[in-house]
Amino acid sequence: MRRNKRKLLTAKAPSRPKLRNAIRWVLYILCIFLAFVTANSGDYTKPLLLIPIALCISSVSGIVTSAIVGSICGFLLDISCGTLPGYHAIGLFLICMLISRLYDRLMQQRFFNLVFFTAITAFFLTGTDFIFQYAIWGHEHVSQIYLHYSLKCLLYTTISSAVCYPIFYCIHRYLLPQRRRTVEKTLKPMEDSEL
C-alpha cells in the first residue's frame, strides 16, 4: 500500500510532446501568416518580419526543417516584395540552414545573437535586392533609394527582431519538446575522450 502511494505521489504528470509540437507549429504558422499580412500592407518602408521569424524557427530546428521554413518564408517574401519567385527564397534557404548548423554546433540561444544574425541577413537580402533591382539598371538617384527605402527597411527589420525574439523564446521554452545541447555539454565528451 505504501509503495503504491509513493509511486502516485512521485509520479510526474505525463507530458504530451505530440500535442505540444502541434501547438508550437500552429503558432509558427500563425506568426508567419501575420508577418506575411504585415509585409503586404503599407508602403515600402516596413520591417520584413519574415526574416526574424525564419531565423527564430531555424535556431531551434534541424537543418531540413530550417531549410523548408527558410524557403517558405523566402517565397512569401518574394510575393510581398514583388520579386521573381525564388529570389529571396534561395537566400533565406541557405541562411536558415547555416543558422541551424551554427546554433546546433556553436551558438547559444541569446538575444544579441539573434539580433546580430537578423541584421546580417537583412543587410544581405536588402543589399542584393538594391543591387539587382536598382543599381545594375542605372536608375537615377540610386543612393537616395538606398538611404530612404532599403536602409530604413534594414533598420526596422533589425529592431523588429527585438519583438520577435521574446515571443519565440516563450514558445520554445514552454512548447519545445527537447532542449538543444549547450557548448559545455558538447565539449565535455570531447574532453573525456582526450584523457
Image: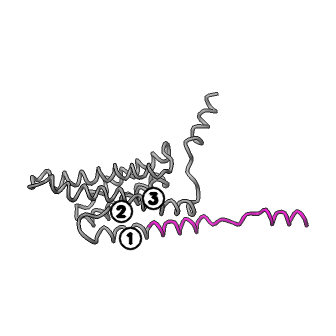
* Labels in figure, total: 3
At label 2, the amino acid type is Leu
* Residue sitting at x 20%, y 58%: 148
Q: Position of residue 160 (x, y in %)?
A: 37, 60
| Quadrant location of the C terminus in the rendered image | top right
* Residue sitting at x 58%, y 69%: 19
Going from N to C along the chain, the mark reached first, 1 or 3, is 1
Mark 2 lies on a secondary structure that is loop
* Residue sitting at x 30%, y 63%: 77
At label 1, the amino acid type is Leu
| Quadrant location of the N terminus in the rendered image | bottom right
C-beta proximity under 8 Å, tags 1 and 2: yes
Please tell me whether residue 3 is drawn above or below residue 94 in the rendered image.
Answer: below
At label 3, the amino acid type is Tyr
Q: Which numbered marker is on residue 165? A: 3
C-beta proximity under 8 Å, tags 3 and 2: no
Q: Mark 1 = which residue?
A: 34
Going from N to C along the chain, the mark reached first, 3 or 2, is 2
Q: Position of residue 36 (x, y in %)?
A: 34, 68
Q: Mark 2 = which residue?
A: 49
Mark 1 lies on a secondary structure that is helix
* Residue sitting at x 29%, y 64%: 46
Disc 1 to disc 2, C-alpha distance: 9 Å
Question: Which residue is nearer to you in this view: 192 or 162?
Answer: 162
Depth check, mark 1 against mark 3: the one in front is: 3
Q: The magenta stretch spans which residues?
A: 1-28
Q: Is residue 160 magenta?
A: no
Mark 3 lies on a secondary structure that is helix
